[in-house]
Image (tube, grey):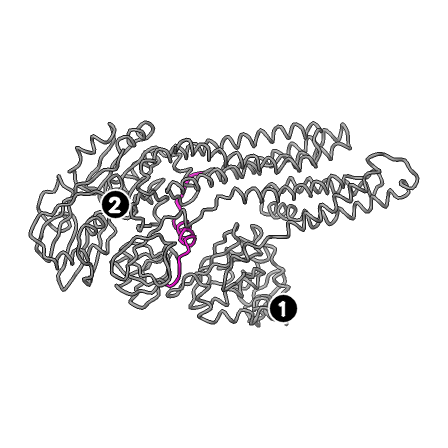
Amino acid sequence: MHKNNCYHCGSVCKVNEIKIDDKLFCCHGCKTVYEILNQNELSCYYDLQNAPGTIPTEIKGKFDYLDNDEIASKIIEFNDSDISVVNFYIPNIHCSSCIWVLENLHKLNKNVITSLVNFPKKEVRITFNNKNISLKEVVELITSIAYEPYISLDDAEVAKNKIDRKLIYQVAVAGFAFGNVMLLSFPEYFQMDEYWLNQFKPFFRALMLLLAVPALVYSAKDYLISAYKGLKHGILNIDVPISLGILVLFFRSSYEIFSQTGQGYFDSLTGLIFFLLLGKIFQQKTYGFLSFERDYKSYFPIAVTKVNKDKTKDNIAVHNIKKGDRLLIRNEEIIPVDGILLNGNGLLDYSFVTGESIPVIKISGDKVYAGGKQMQGAIEIEVLQGVEQSYLTQLWSNDIFQKNTSKNIKSLTDSISKHFTIIILSITFFAGIYWYIIDETMAFQVVSAILIIACPCALALSAPFALGNMIRIFGREKFYLKNTNVIEAIAKIKTLVFDKTGTITTSNSVEIAYFGKVLSPIELCNIKSILRGSNHPLSRILYDYLIYDDNAEVSNFHELLGKGLTGTIDNIQIKIGSSNFVASNEDQSNQTSIYIKFDNEIKGKYIFNNTYRKGLKNIFLNLSKHYKIAIITGDNTGEKEILTKILPPNSQILFHQKPEDKLKYIKSLQNNNQNVMMLGDGLNDAGALVQSNVGISVSENINVFSPACDAILDANNFNKIPAFIALSKKTISIIKISFAISFLYNIIGLLFAISGNLTPIVAAILMPISSITVVIFATITTNIIAKKILS
């Protein structure tokens, strides 16, 4: 490269050139990219060519097919206005440094907005500005830093499911070395004093050294690299003591060979690596068998309203949606699948997908994407392709909607693991000194055995498997949790707050009566057409009650949560809602009512006689033994007497509560050190659900899906709430017992290792067995307890 050219991009540097590490840069952007790559050991990027900031020659043209809009549309998950979202499977992701670099793509190119890595699945989800950077340029960017994505227009799962043969090859190399080193060591074992054996002893020892090198360099490299990178970032991970044990054995054995003072410990070294890797394969097989990965088609409860050809409507599960289906999306509903807007005006909030809260206007014929929330009235869409529920779950778990939680079990585990490693290294140091004084030959065996046997792997695995298995159990019982942190939060609650309508009442058997002026069929049709756009429980009940068409064209639709609906049909403004909302002076203190107003004339009201869920009194009685209970509702005091009879003494009942009042009430409880579980309908109670420590949406019609909630409970299993809370507490107890088993195993193992009664090879065999034991214990115990409590 010319001496005045930028080291990164190759452009000619101007007068105000920037210099660092004797390299010239044309701007601060190029300098920043260089520093990022250099600090994270990615300077090999600059071996690609003389001007690495440009696209390398071997990449140029490789991804030109991505400029084809039809092809790009099959890969891009979301593409609207200025924002696009794409999810790539990247086989080369293997460590924390990979995560760091891929999640800092915005520093390499400012048009990349966010990039989030899913490490277990080796995926990166990239949000970018499609006006300034194309999909092809995004792919070229990540490929140029050695993270080429796997792109398949057919089925990317084929690549993900390929067996990773690297570990098998590493085991094969270690096993070959171990077997041959053992064979060459036989004369040493039996101390055979034979002329020809003595003559060839140096040669045999040299062969053992040569066989140990590939076992160290290739088979054990993942342990060594992980330990090195951990230490470099100030992290004492579990690979540090393992790597230290391996290196101690290798260098001590090499010293004995070169100094001709002994045969070394190459048999122990190669055996140690072999059994560590064998244990890793065994662990993977076991964990795969016990996998608690959710089957989203079975466990994720999103339904949607399908409009049939005869205009009738059915609620169907999203995994039954097919291309060409016509779906009704009501106000505040999440669109579960990509489609074309057919009817109505779309005002879509895509913050669920992109984090951007500015609504996007859509008209008939426009494409709409899964994850958008309709903000104004009802719309109808035609489905373009079947839904992938894991995509919706990924959105549900988006960091945008995560709550700030106090220290959980994962942070506790990480902290214990860190201090655990420090303690083990200290024990190893003092035990090594002691044995070096007593018996130098035993010192290295003891040191290696301690470093291998003392492993917090079992400690780190007990929580994920216990919590993960419980999520699966809850899913089978139609209690759907956002993530494992929710179980920990449930176990800590002190107060339960229930909404009334749609939560402790059921819409399946509500008695409805109309009082007022006689409504014409056209007026009833108009009322139903307004109600069609709402997902409020009372709106849905009244909508189902009216046996008229809902095909009137509604304009200026608005829904004021907790108050009512308004819309215009044939230049007539229609208001449907509470007495205050329609400006009625009638006293409604003893009735749950919906008032109807056409222009300035109040036509009448629909009165609802609520039916409470079966066994509600026993549920509250059971819960009151351990928790405080409160009912909070926007309804009037008409059913205060009934609620007082159902609720245990000292329970709190609050009426006439607006959504913002509910949120303030939750805050006041939390200010008094109360961990609160809020159970509501997921729509009017969205603010309270977000504010609570655990927000649960109780749903009979699971069209109402909101990222605000931590869990969704099928209303038919409402009576199992005490059991779910009890199971959450039991799960935490199981994790603590698993911790105790892990500590006990390590203490016993350490005692044997320190006393010199444990060889490194036996330690390597026992280490994975401890992890597997704890995992099996956590999984089986949670299953047994769940069966006992839920039966």
Is 10 displayed left or right of 550 in the figure?
A: right
The quadrant of the rendering that contains the C terminus is: top left
Tell me: residue 524, above or below residue 456.
Answer: below
Could you tell me how far apart the alpha carbons at marks 1 and 2 are, in whole angstroms? 60 Å
Residue at x 68% of width, y 48% of height:
219
User: Which residue is nearer to you in this view: 17 or 493?
Assistant: 493
Q: In x, y percent, where is residue 695?
A: 34, 42
Stretch in magenta: 384-407
Q: How many tags in the picture?
A: 2
* Residue 401 lies in the magenta-colored region: yes
Farthest left residue? 517
Q: In x, y percent, where is residue 545?
A: 18, 50
For badge 2, the amino acid type reads Glu
Give the residue number, with chain letter if any, for mark 1. 50
Q: Of the residues under marks 1 and 2, which one precedes in the sequence?
A: 1
Please tell me in which quadrant of the rendered image residue 711 appears: top left
Tell me: residue 244, above or below residue 119.
Answer: above
Residue at x 26% of width, y 39% of height:
504
For badge 1, the amino acid type reads Asn
Q: In x, y percent, where is residue 182?
A: 78, 41
* Residue 382 lies in the magenta-colored region: no
**Mark 2 Cα-neighbour bin, 10 Å: few <14, some 14–19, many ≥20:** some
Q: Which mark is residue 660?
A: 2
Q: In x, y percent, where is residue 693?
A: 36, 40
User: Which residue is nearer to you in this view: 596 or 492?
Assistant: 596
Mark 2 lies on a secondary structure that is helix
**Mark 1 Cα-neighbour bin, 10 Å: few <14, some 14–19, many ≥20:** some
Tags 1 and 2 touching, CB below 8 Å = no
Q: Nearer the viewer, mark 1 or mark 2?
A: 2
Is 628 displayed left or right of 638 in the figure?
A: right
